[in-house]
Amino acid sequence: MLLHRDPSDPARRAVELAQRGRMILDVATADLEAAEQRLGPFHATSWHFRQALAEAGRSWDRLRAEFGGPALESALSQPPITFLTLGAEDGELPPVVLIPIAGRTYRAEKIAGTPLAPTQWRLTRLSPPLEHGPYYACRLRDGSTQCDCAEWTYQVADGARPARPLCKHLAALAALGWL
């Protein structure tokens, strides 16, 4: 597993850079969309975020030139080995934790558990946002896992249910040791 390799390992480094680069690009895109929606496309804040997105795009292009497109796509399909925390820990608002899942950036929020599902996460895709709201993933009291995404639902509905069905959301949380 790449997460447990030495940080100087070239394969781990490539995956981590690709995942971080994708998250930064997605954050820059979401920032610009929010600024333009709230303030309009010609406001100074929107201009600032447009410049930040352009710089993130140039950085992504440098990664693509260094590692190659297929290597970046392969790296983005790997389980997450990094996450991005935005916001100060001592601030009034809790920090936002972003994780890469299958080439997309999700906000991961640990939510209060219940006796039936003591460990629960809300996963909200950053860009483009999900039409039907966030996904909820959990570990049940008996040790099994559940997610409300279509991938997990279809695994269960097919009847050919493996011992531990994992969708990409559950696999990502498990890879980080959060589930």
Image (cartoon, rainbow, N blue to C red):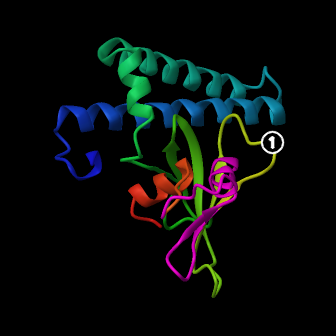
Q: Answer left or right for 120 relative to 55.
A: right
| Residue shown at the point (73%, 40%) measured from the top left | 129
> Which one is nearer the viewer's eye here, 157 or 127?
157
Spot the residue most to the front: 160
Quarter assignment of residue 16: top left
Classed neighbour count for the residue bearing mark 1: other residues with Cα under 10 Å, few (<14), some (14–19), many (≥20): few
- Residue located beneath label 1 in the image: 131
Residue 28: % across, % down: 59, 31
**33 displayed left or right of 76:** right
The extreme top residue here reads 65
* In this picture, residue 42 sits left or right of residue 53: right
**Quick one: 161 or 133, which is closer to the camera?**
161
The x, y position of residue 8, in whole percent, is 16, 39
- Residue 12 position, x and y percent, is 26, 38
Q: Magenta stretch?
A: 137-163
Question: What residue do we see at 81% from left, 48% from top?
Answer: 132
Rendered location of residue 21, percent (x, y)? 44, 31
Residue 109 versus residue 44 in the image, above or below: below
Q: Quadrant of residue 91?
A: bottom right
